[in-house]
Image (cartoon, rainbow, N blue to C red):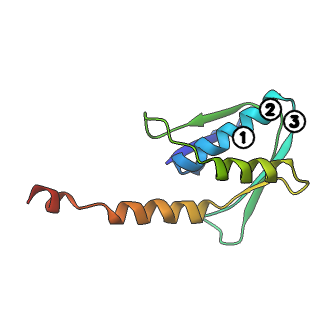
Amino acid sequence: MGQLFYGNSSQPVIIPDRQLAHLKMIVTTKLRRNESFTLSWRHVDDSPGGRTTVWLQPSIPLQFVFDSAVGESLDSAILREYAEQASSSAGLTLDLSADLQADLDKLAALPSRATQAA
């Protein structure tokens, strides 16, 4: 699981590495062009139904921290979707729970260590 640090906050937003890699590409591209936009997500851990929206602009510090040392492969369809959302008046909205569930499903499908040792 990756982490996104926004502004001066010491509390990161926890985002799966694959989703964070796509987000990083869109954010850095838009900010390099001096294009500001909003980024929103629903709270997964604490309060169901709660959400956060932040304003992304070049002057606000961002830090992307990946759990894996290996870079993620990027999906062009996801990049297009994120770019279109980021360019809309509603901004980019991440579904952290859906991506988290997809990661958990992938882990569950992997053979267990006991099966591999047999």
Q: Position of residue 48 (x, y in %)?
A: 65, 72
Q: Give the distance between the C-alpha atoms of the residues marked 3 and 1, in whole angstroms.
A: 11 Å
Q: Disc 1 marks which amino acid?
A: Ile
Mark before the other along the chain sequence, 3 or 1: 1
Question: Residue 31: which numbered mark, if any?
Answer: 2
Q: Is residue 6 above or below residue 32?
A: below
- The residue lying at 58 percent from left, 64 percent from top is 97
Question: Which is more toward the observer, 114 or 47?
Answer: 114
Q: Residue furthest bottom?
A: 48
Q: Position of residue 5 (x, y in %)?
A: 65, 39
Q: Do the residues bearing badges 2 and 3 touch, measured as CB atoms within 8 Å?
A: yes
Give the SS element for disc 1: helix
- The residue lying at 62 percent from left, 42 percent from top is 4
**From the viewer's perspective, is 99 left or right of 8?**
left
> Residue 25 falls in which quadrant of the image?
top right
Q: Disc 3 marks which amino acid?
A: Glu
User: Which residue matches tag 3?
Assistant: 35
Q: Is residue 2 above or below residue 107?
A: above
**From the viewer's perspective, is 92 left or right of 111?**
right
Q: Residues within 10 Å of mark 1 (few under 14, many from 20)?
A: some
User: Which residue matches tag 1?
Assistant: 26
